[in-house]
């Protein structure tokens, strides 16, 4: 292949990498806004692949001015892809049919990307008459670009830039590729001055978008959350948002409220003090999740020897151990000398752990994704059991028995399947509604509970009431959540979908 067309190979690399990033942005944003990541990624991949074929088919109708067609494709992909993240968030705020916007973006980007390779192939073939070499080279660059985009997005772009800046950056790269083509092959392009002005204008708009991405994010996030946002942090694993209204601080992870300072004590007292009242030895405590330090705060009310906290996101720990809004609530519990923090996956920690614990507190986010669903599986509870002393107790936050009834009882049944005697209970937490927990032990758990420490909600007078469930909160017709058959995620996502209607 002659040198004069090698620049077109570079554009193939760029457009492929950027197109993959656009589709990943669409999938990730949709998972963030709607949940059910398996569905969102599956739909995106399926529609994108179909649209690639559609674009390839449509390209046969471009018979004249192929360089003009190629420039138009590059500019259109940059424009649509660059504004894709912004369009999705605005659609979620102001349009009822969010799915339609999502589908249109996927199909538009896929169709344009699918038309690119056939057009470039025809441009080169017209001059060099070596279709075999042309196609092999084009597809090589196309696949390499896709690989680069799929690696760069989760490891570099999203953690460092966030959704908006990443989309604008990819748009800028697409439009820059168009500018290179315009200036390299100016004599083959009709109305070249017009395209120079248009491409330059679009490139500038993308650059402005990157510069002001943080401001755009604050405005958009302000529409998603009812209260004033005082912190936004996109970590490697999740998006953390903190809001404030008068004295109420709320922490959100990927759009889901983790706690409200107005009532978090109800949740954490139920999570910690109920199992603590049945633990014989209160020496070594394991907390899986709980990076906000609020469960640690309650555990430290007891004369424990050590607390091991396992939380995947080191940035979460950093925020909750340094931000005064949080440290005032958790009483600087994350800086306790009794606490040892492990920034790693809870599943991996249990696989390699040799230590035995008296109490295992599983305070993880709801099972709305594959990675979280694994931490509610039968195998996970089997690993928990291996890390427990003979008289130890495990407690698991288990979503709402009212809003997500099947999910709650699936967790209950899954714990039971690993040989635990399980005792379910629930409390009213205004920020969440009716919220449930499952407590498990190798020994039978009797009904004699006694709260030993100072609490704001739990008392010896009301503790027995939390073990009673109403008729509409019971559903035993559920399956065990196995690692090989993750039914819990579907139960949970169905519940979220029903309550959002």
Image (spheres, helix red, strand yellow):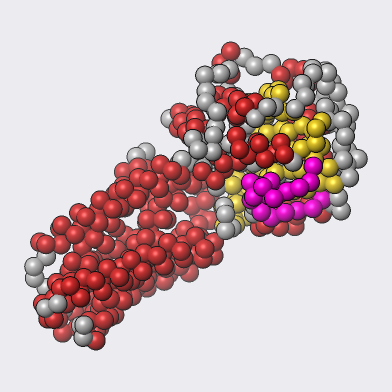
Magenta-colored stretch includes residue 341: yes
Q: Which residues are magenta?
A: 339-356
Q: Position of residue 159 (x, y in %)?
A: 54, 61
Q: Is residue 327 above or below residue 304?
A: below
Number of marks in picture? 0
Q: Is residue 256 left or right of residue 343?
A: left
* Residue at image coords 57%, 52%: 238
Magenta-colored stretch includes residue 411: no
Viewport quadrant of the C terminus:
top left
Q: Quadrant of residue 245?
A: top right
* Residue at image coords 15%, 57%: 57
Q: Is residue 154 above or below residue 393?
A: below
Q: Is residue 294 visible?
A: no
Out of 38 and 163, give the one closest to the viewer. Answer: 38
* Residue at image coords 70%, 27%: 420
Residue most extreme to the bottom: 3
Out of 315 and 339, give the one closest to the viewer. Answer: 339
Q: Quadrant of residue 108?
A: bottom left
Q: Is residue 156 visible?
A: yes
Q: Is residue 451 above or below residue 292?
A: above
């Amino acid at each position: 292949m002659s040198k004069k067309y090698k620049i077109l190979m570079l554009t193939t690399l760029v457009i492929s990498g950027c197109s993959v990033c656009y589709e990943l942005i669409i999938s990730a944003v949709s998972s963030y806004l709607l949940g059910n990541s398996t569905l969102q990624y599956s739909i995106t991949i399926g529609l994108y692949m179909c649209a690639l074929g559609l674009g390839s088919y449509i390209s046969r109708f471009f018979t004249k001015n192929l360089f003009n067609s190629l420039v138009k494709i590059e500019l259109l992909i940059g424009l649509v892809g660059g504004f894709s993240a912004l369009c999705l968030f605005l659609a979620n705020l102001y349009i009822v049919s969010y799915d339609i916007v999502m589908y249109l973006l996927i199909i538009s980007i896929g169709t344009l990307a699918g038309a690119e390779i056939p057009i470039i192939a025809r441009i080169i073939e017209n001059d060099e008459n070596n279709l075999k070499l042309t196609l092999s080279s084009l597809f090589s660059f196309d696949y390499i670009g896709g690989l680069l985009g799929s690696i760069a997005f989760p490891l570099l772009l999203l953690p460092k830039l966030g959704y908006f800046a990443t989309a604008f950056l990819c748009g800028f790269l697409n439009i820059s590729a168009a500018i290179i083509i315009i200036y390299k092959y100016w004599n083959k392009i009709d109305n070249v001055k017009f395209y120079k002005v248009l491409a330059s204008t679009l490139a500038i708009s993308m650059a402005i978008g990157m510069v002001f991405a943080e401001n755009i994010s604050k405005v958009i996030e302000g529409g998603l959350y009812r209260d004033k946002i005082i912190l936004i942090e996109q970590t490697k694993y999740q998006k953390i948002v903190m809001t404030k209204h008068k004295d109420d601080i709320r922490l959100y992870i990927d759009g889901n409220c983790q706690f409200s300072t107005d009532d978090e004590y109800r949740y954490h007292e139920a999570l910690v003090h109920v199992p603590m009242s049945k633990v014989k030895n209160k020496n070594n405590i394991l907390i899986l999740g709980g990076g906000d330090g609020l469960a640690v705060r309650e555990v430290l009310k007891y004369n424990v020897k050590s607390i091991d906290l396992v939380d995947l996101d080191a940035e979460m720990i950093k925020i909750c151990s340094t931000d005064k809004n949080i440290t005032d609530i958790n009483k600087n519990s994350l800086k306790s000398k009794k606490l040892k923090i492990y920034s790693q996956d809870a599943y991996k920690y249990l696989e390699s752990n040799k230590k035995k614990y008296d109490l295992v507190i599983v305070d993880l986010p709801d099972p709305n994704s594959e990675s979280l669903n694994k931490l509610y599986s039968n195998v996970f509870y089997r690993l928990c059991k291996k890390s427990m002393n003979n008289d130890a107790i495990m407690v698991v936050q288990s979503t709402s028995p009212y809003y997500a009834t099947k999910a709650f009882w699936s967790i209950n049944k899954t714990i039971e399947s690993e040989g635990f005697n399980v005792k379910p209970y629930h409390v009213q937490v205004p920020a969440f509604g009716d919220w449930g927990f499952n407590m498990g032990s190798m020994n039978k758990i009797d009904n004699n509970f006694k709260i030993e420490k100072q609490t704001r909600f739990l008392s010896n007078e009301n503790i027995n009431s939390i073990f009673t469930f109403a008729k509409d909160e019971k559903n035993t017709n559920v399956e065990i959540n196995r690692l090989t058959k993750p039914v819990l995620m579907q139960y949970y996502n169905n519940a979220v979908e029903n309550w959002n209607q």
